[in-house]
Image: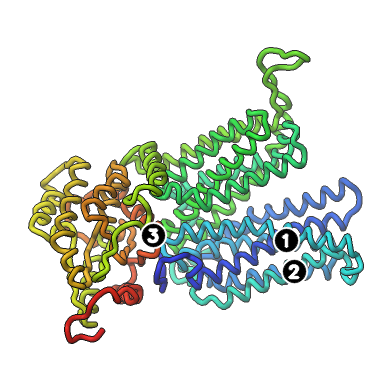
Amino acid sequence: MISTGSITGDGPVLRVPGFRRLWIGLGLSSLGDWLGLLALTAMANLMVEGYAARNYAIAGVLFLRVVPALVVGPVAGYVADRTDRRTVLVWGDYVRGLLFLSIPFVGELWWVFVVTVLVESVSLVWGPSKDATVPNLVSPAQLESANAISTTTTYASAVPAAALFALLTTVDRLFPSLLGFLERGAVDLALWLNGISFIVSGLVIASLHQIPRGPADLHGETNLVAAVLHGWRYVVGTPLVRGLVTGMVGAFAAGGVVVGLARTYVDDLGGGDAGYAVLFGAVFVGMGLGMWRGTRLLRRMNRRRVFGFALVGCGLLLVPLALVPHLEVVVGLAVAVGFLAGTAWINGMTMLGLEVPDEVRGRTFAFVGSAVRLALALVLAVAPLLAGLVGTVAFGPEVAGGGRLFEYGGAAVTIVLAALLLTVVGVLAYRLMDDHEGRSLLSDLSGALRREAGAATDPLAATGAGVFTERGVFVAFEGGEGAGKSTQARRLQTWLEAEGYSVLLTHEPGDTEVGRELRRIVLDPQTGVISHRAEALMYAADKAEHVDRVVLPALTRGEVVVTDRYVDSTIAYQGAGRDLLDDDVERIARWATGDLRPHLTVLLDVAPEHGLTRFEERDRIEAESADFHERVRAMFLRLAEAQPDHYLVVDGRQTPEEIEEQVRERLRPLLVGASPRDGATA
């Protein structure tokens, strides 16, 4: 459910000019946001006297950062879907920058509170507009990487922001005359730098012209209330999105409990400030690793299963984290919890970007953001109260010196309750999202881990390994049913022949005598049920004959070979679609083809509900369930994501002419391996 527009190529996501500029703007905005939080709380602390008053002032700033989600959150999605998103992003940064710049001039606590509310309100609109824009700037295969980079940048910006604020305050303390021209020294300077960072971010994004308008401004509801309710109905009425939102909100609620009680819990373990800092850092280190490595480690699993598995894993790991009274073990478990949380978050954001239609994407992201903020606010208020009411829980035999063998403070007990809640939420989200077909979760997980472990030593399992013929050029078109592969293969053949190249257009299965008989068996609805392993072996037999009799001879002659389907289809259909391990299926298919790899694989990405409408009659594979075809589509995208240098992912809903132009542009540099026909000049 995406629109890639003019995207061509699927290399590293930061090579996409549009996304790179948005990422720079996001980095500057995030830096300003964290620096702003530090500066506003410091400003509030300076403007009042007395211990209690300072605590109330700081608490007021933190509380007012959450309150706007109650009112502005629903409206934010409406704005993101109905207005020019580029205008929202640019002017959102300008307005926030100017608001921060105004604080040193006004110099009153009430204005700090007002600015906090206004800035947070603008951020609530800016965030969904940014999240809804990313899928329009990158290809489907790059979306997971784009989300990982965006999320990591958002949270990692806290580190340089904290370092910068610490540097400014240290300089102000050591050399007070240096910032003497400012009334509040380092705090005022931090606010100035904060405001400037937002304005520069706006200038960067203003140079980005690939951002589309919110699609709902062209049609649909004209009433604000109706539009907001429509977005909410979509979230509640779509099982996949409902599962995602349930999981994300539950994860953040449980995380809020841990954050709210971490300081007290570390004291119970005798860790003090140093222990608290180590535990806090361990969680973020784990999150960073999960965002960077978690999705790659489990890249061959269905994203829905990865999301549910990660949530349940977080909940289960929080139980020993709360009950084991050793800080060293707790820190290690905190890294693991953060790893699974980071993995779940990236998968959730990626699925929202891929599956939610563009016309309601802004409202969906706004709904998620508002729900997460409200859950955090609620648990941050309730968790300490609950921990205080619980007090100390002791059980087991008495020990020397008094007391019981097992004694836990209210913080540990409350974290256990949060862990149980998160486990239940994870199971519920998994059941809402899993298609309940194909292989079991344990088989899926073991296969993904086994493949990762074997990739370094197995030449057929290692990403990027394989044979690329030195003569000719090999191009494969892949995609789900009705994606337009045959049309584009013929168009490419026509163009290449006009350019003077000798072209062989072929297809799988069925372009040999043996293959035609195998095709009849595997596709004819009259065949009925076939053993999944037998089906995979028949497709492998077709590939072996096809490569030996058709593909390799043409490549040896220096021709351009264009095939409609190749190995990826077997991995997607017989691996992800059936109950077979995709790495086992790939081994068979790679062996059958002598591990011959295409120089370029063009993946035409179309949602199954769109592609299957192009058929009046369906063969045995086309007649499979919608869930089957969803699994197939997800695997195609994962394969493309694993080897972006050899793939071009194109939105199959574009016009044939638009798709053809993108394929030509990507293929041109590869044609040096093919020989033009005698007398022709390419």
Gap in angstroms between the C-alphas marked 3 and 2: 41 Å
Q: Quick check: can you spot residue 487?
A: no
Q: Earlier in the sequence, mark 3 or mark 1?
A: 1
What residue is shown at x 31% (from left), y 51% (from top)?
A: 460
Give the left or right position of residue 651, taking residue 400 as reference.
left
Residue sitting nearer the eye, 654 or 173:
173
Mark toward the viewer: 3 or 2: 3
Place residue 330 in its image quadrant: top right
Q: Is residue 488 above or below residue 240?
A: below
Q: Quadrant of the N terminus?
A: bottom left
Q: Earlier in the sequence, mark 2 or mark 1?
A: 1
Task: Mark 2: give few (<14), some (14-19) or many (20+) Cα within 10 Å.
Answer: many
Place residue 551 in its image quadrant: bottom left
Disc 3 secondary structure class: loop
Q: Are marks 3 and 2 in contact (CB under 8 Å)?
A: no
Disc 2 secondary structure class: helix
Disc 1 secondary structure class: helix
Residue type marked 2: Leu
Q: Can you give x and y, in whole percent of width and height, for residue 523 in the image?
A: 15, 52
Q: Quadrant of the C terminus?
A: bottom left
For disc 1, the marked residue is: 35
For disc 2, the marked residue is: 193
Q: Quick check: can you spot residue 275?
A: yes
Residue type marked 3: Gln
Task: Mark 3: give few (<14), some (14-19) or many (20+) Cα within 10 Å.
Answer: some
Residue sitting nearer the eye, 605 or 297:
297
For disc 3, the marked residue is: 643
Give the left or right position of residue 15, taking residue 460 as reference.
right
Residue sitting nearer the eye, 489 or 99:
489
Task: Mark 1: give few (<14), some (14-19) or many (20+) Cα within 10 Å.
Answer: many
Residue type marked 1: Leu
What residue is shown at x 65% (from left), y 32% (from top)?
A: 414
